[in-house]
Image (cartoon, grey):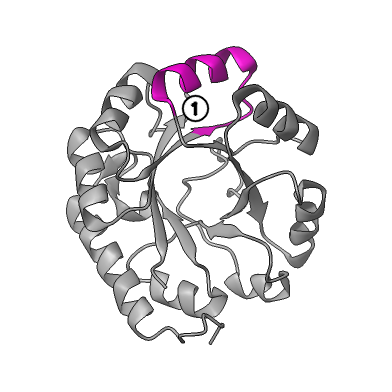
Amino acid sequence: MKTEVKICGLKTTEAVEHAVALGASHTGFIFFPKSPRNIEPDDAGRLAERIRGRAKIVAVTVDADNDDLDEIVSVLRPDILQLHGAEVPERVLTVKAIYGLPVMKALSIREASDLDRIDPYLGIVDRFLFDAKPPAGSELPGGNGVSFDWRLLDALDGSVDYMLSGGLNAENIGEALALTGARAVDTSSGVESAPGVKDLKLMDAFFDAVRRAEAVRPRSGSKT
């Protein structure tokens, strides 16, 4: 089975087009002013129109209020809303009711007990995104280029649909896929030459590494 790949933090025509040409299943646009990958809704909307229907368009927000979400959804017309802040289950339900869009909820993982936070969201979110907890002092909830111990996901119920994130790059994606059996992955800083600057060669290398990992993955999809 082909691995879903989300390239997140896209800001340029060149990067968006290249990601989709390589086979990205999801394209992520970040609406968070503190991020070097922040993009204005109008700019994101123009980029999204170039690849609409060829990859799913994901709006990434951090504790956004309804006014901000109204603008983002109206202009971008995303396929998915990714909530990457401290949104509680009740807030997720409200967002889904207002906008009628699938929601992917990001949860930060550092230790086994962090997986307990999944339970209140089960049956509410459409997919989880597991990211590493940010290092001390970081103002970014994601995109910090750090990973967590992927072996923690061994305890995860196999029915939980998730996308793996956190410091993934061409050098470690093969190991990450082998250890977790993840069917969907997300990278941002791992394909950048500088914060917020996508590197086409690094994107090439990432997709090459994913395809190599797929070639040796058991047909059953079970973890190795």
Name the residue carrying label 1. Answer: 32
Vertical relation: 28 (above or below) 217: above
Query: At x 49% / y 14%, what residue is drawn?
Result: 71
Which stretch appears magenta?
Answer: 60-77
- In magenta stretch: residue 171: no
Total residue callouts:
1
Query: At x 60% / y 25%, what residue is drawn?
Result: 99
For residue 214, which quarter of the picture?
bottom left
Vertical relation: 182 (above or below) 50: below
Q: Nearer the viewer, residue 161 or 10?
A: 161
Q: Position of residue 119 (x, y in %)?
A: 81, 54
Drawn side of residue 141 relative to residue 112, left or right: left
Vertical relation: 202 (above or below) 94: below
Please tell me how crowded label 1 is: few (under 14), some (14-19), or many (20+) other residues with Cα within 10 Å. Answer: some
- In magenta stretch: residue 71: yes
Q: Nearer the viewer, residue 126 or 84?
A: 126
Going by the numbered disc 1, the residue's amino acid type is Phe
Query: At x 52% / y 84%, what residue is drawn?
Result: 220
